[in-house]
Amino acid sequence: MRDVYIIGVGNTACGRFPDKAAHILAREAAWAAVQDSGIHARKIEIAFCGHVYQGMGVGQRALKDIGLVGQPTINVEGACGSGTLSLWEAWRTIAYGQYDIALALGVENLSRILSGGPLPLEEDDLEVSIGMGMPGLYAIRASKYMSEYGVTLEQLAEVVVKSRYHASLNPLAQYRKPTTVEEVLNAPVIADPLTRNMCCPVGDAAAAAVLCSEEHVGELAKKTPIKILGCVAQSGKYSSPTGLTCDPSENVWRTSQMAYEMAGLGPEDMDVAEIHDAFSIAEMMVVESLGFCEKGEGATLIDEKSTWVGGDKVAVNPSGGLLSRGHPVGATGLLQTAEIVRQLREEVEPERQVKDAKVGIIETMGGAQPAMDGITCVVSILGK
């Protein structure tokens, strides 16, 4: 396979923008990525657009106003992993030699379809039909995890404190006000033990990346090109023949192990990570599955503040993550990608810049269904 590089990224701010249709948000992000790359838009040979709820042909509607018509544009859906699934598609079409320049795009406008509350799920799923939503699912995971490893509510709240602090330094984040453990714990309970502040918000945004082959990176790249060292997408396996509540850890572990092998690196080589912390318990589970610590030690990293920017281990979610930067479903994976690219280029705000960052990892999880450990997991490793 050929080496593939990211030569441009762009994204909108995260927030509630009910007056902006999804294709408008996507157009802004795509154009920002093209401008960041410095290439002419018509050099893009193929595009992939990740989204979940935005209707027919949103990728084509987004790109026509920046002159991108005629080329293949494929709309991609992989639940919350849709954005990084479009990155995976763009990466492999170049890596396998089919095209040289591709655009990965992700978008979601949730405030147009939701006034609040959890995302609508498939009603023919057994758990959903009896009232299970994503907050309830993660609440059960949290309760089990707390029971097994002695984790406290205060430790769950500390995840949010870190997230809000990082987001307070990110001008594109949805929630930019720092918080305290007490404020997190005193927020209304959504699904015991998770309070509202332990759950990601409803919001809107778009993000995009321009990718090119190794043959063209020298002539095209205007900024430091970021190499895709590993990029793997997987679906969940059966979690149990009898259990209804799934743990996504196996899917994340398996996908990340494949990405590490592709990159020729390990968890100890990662400087910065953007992970899928849709609920505060998810950060503890994911850092373990990515190999940053042993099983049951995710809370220890929180206590030690070692995953904060400036900590002594990999910096986790310097953007604020899903909890605070926001989780506009289809855009999330490419928001994570844009953050890692800018971290490696040393382009983010000084207060949240990870010092001497050379390698970053992106983990995005998508969806859940009975007796399976997640619908989609995509793990990418980027380096300069």
Image (cartoon, rainbow, N blue to C red):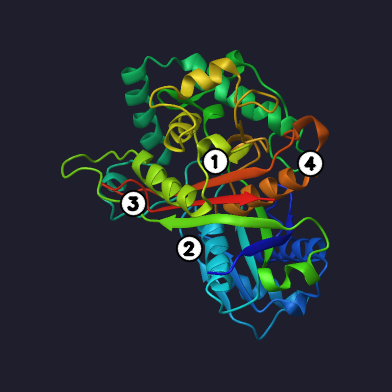
Badge nearest the viewer, 1 or 2: 1
Mark yes or no: residue 109 visible.
no
User: Mark 3–mark 4 contact, CB under 8 Å?
Assistant: no
User: Mark 3–mark 1 contact, CB under 8 Å?
Assistant: no
- Which residue is label 1 attached to? 275
Q: Amino acid at mark 4?
A: Val
Q: CA distance from mark 4 to mark 1?
A: 18 Å
- Which residue is label 2 attached to? 77
Where residue 157 appears, as percent x and y from the top left, is 54, 20
Mark yes or no: residue 310 visible.
yes
- Which residue is label 4 attached to? 348
Dot 4 falls on a residue whose secondary structure is loop
Q: Report whether 73 appears left or right of 145.
A: right
Q: CA distance from mark 4 to mark 2?
A: 29 Å
- Which residue is label 3 attached to? 236
Where residue 309 appears, as percent x and y from the top left, is 69, 28
